[in-house]
Image (spheres, rainbow, N blue to C red):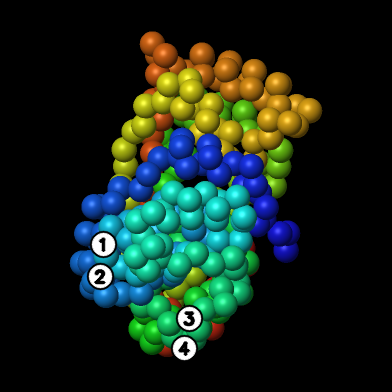
């Protein structure tokens, strides 16, 4: 399958500055209730990016090992989190992949995955998760993104227009967009115990934040791309058409899944979408 590890090269600053943070309390409360999460659990954050999911577990007191293959994202995470957590020995950052983490067998109680699961080779990643988890360990998959559909006709038009913006002026959105539906079908991955919840909210973006957020997407042209000016103009037209008084309001969903692999379950159940 394609190598997606370099998709965010050059995007780390925009990613960390403009992407929405996870709802810490809403996630931790559920993981404590569902899984019995305690600060003593060792956590592997797979596809850690700039460390947004790792921050949640660090705030809970957990020792975290962050697995991130992209040098830019890894370096940004180290710079931002090092002064507090790395020097205290609470955080380790490793250059590795979801399919080959380099971690010892049975070394963590919980595997956490943020907005990255759709880039993994599902079968190989599932096998690796099972290998590094202690018996009965948990996988927590957390995704936070714009809501994809709405019964409100006006909002439907707004959401569809953004999809068209990415498809028409972006890079390879049509080829990779199907993978984002992974978070809506997590039951296909696990045949063991599973808990799921969604947290719905809205986000208000001014032009700078909307621009930075959109440029952090892996399907947006880079600023040195020949079609960047066209893409930026399309972003501006979209923002002007759907914002009110300089603010674009978008619906947001946080998908939370915590699951265990069944004792007799083999690797990932089905092909990657």
Distance from Cα at disc 1 to Cα at disc 2:
6 Å
Q: In whole angstroms, how far apart are the C-alphas of marks 3 and 4?
A: 16 Å
Q: Which sits in the foreground, 196 or 211?
A: 211
Count the marks: how many?
Answer: 4
Local crowd size for mark 2, using a 10 Å CA cut-off: few (<14), some (14–19), many (≥20): some
Q: Quadrant of residue 262?
A: bottom left
Q: Mark 4: which secondary structure?
A: loop
Which sits earlier in the primary sequence, circle 3 or circle 1?
1
Which residue is tagged 4? 264
Q: Report how far apart the C-alphas of labels 1 and 4 lie in the structure.
A: 32 Å
Pointer 3: residues within 10 angstroms few (<14), some, or many (20+)? many
Quote the CA–CA distance across marks 4 and 2.
29 Å
Q: Quick one: quadrant of the C terminus? A: bottom right
As helix, strand or loop, the secondary structure at mark 1 comes to loop
Mark 1 or 4 closer to N-term?
1
Point out which mark residue 132 bears: 3
Q: Residue at x 48, y 81 (%)?
A: 132
Q: Which mark is residue 104?
A: none
Q: CA distance from mark 3 to mark 1?
A: 21 Å
Residue 237: x percent and y percent?
58, 16
Whether residue 11 is visible, yes or no, is yes
- For disc 2, the marked residue is 39
234 relative to 7, above or below: above
Which of marks 4 and 3 precedes in the sequence?
3
Residue matched to label 1: 60
Front position among marks 3 and 1: 1
């Amino acid at each position: 399958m394609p190598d997606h590890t370099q998709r965010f090269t050059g995007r780390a600053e925009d990613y960390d500055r403009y992407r929405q943070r996870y709802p810490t309390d809403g996630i931790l409360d559920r993981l404590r209730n569902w899984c019995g999460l305690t600060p003593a659990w060792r956590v592997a954050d797979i596809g850690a990016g700039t460390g947004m999911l790792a921050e949640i577990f660090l705030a809970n007191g957990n020792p975290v090992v962050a697995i991130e293959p992209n040098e830019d994202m890894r370096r940004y995470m180290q710079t931002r989190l090092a002064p507090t957590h790395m020097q205290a020995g609470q955080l380790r950052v490793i250059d590795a992949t979801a399919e080959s983490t380099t971690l010892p067998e049975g070394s963590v109680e919980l595997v956490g995955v943020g907005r990255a699961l759709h880039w993994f080779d599902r079968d190989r990643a599932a096998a690796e998760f099972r290998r590094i988890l202690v018996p009965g360990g948990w996988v927590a998959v957390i995704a936070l993104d714009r809501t994809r559909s709405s019964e409100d006709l006006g909002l439907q038009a707004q959401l569809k227009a953004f999809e068209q913006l990415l498809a028409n002026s972006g890079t390879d959105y049509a080829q990779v967009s199907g993978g984002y539906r992974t978070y809506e079908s997590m039951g296909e991955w696990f045949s063991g115990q599973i808990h799921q919840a969604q947290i719905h909210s809205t986000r208000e973006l001014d032009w700078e934040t909307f621009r930075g957020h959109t440029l952090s997407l892996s399907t947006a042209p880079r600023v040195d791309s020949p079609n960047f000016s066209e893409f930026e103009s399309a972003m501006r037209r979209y923002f002007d058409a759907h914002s009110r008084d300089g603010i674009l309001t978008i619906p947001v969903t946080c998908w939370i899944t915590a699951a265990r692999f069944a004792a007799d379950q083999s690797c990932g159940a089905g092909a990657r979408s």
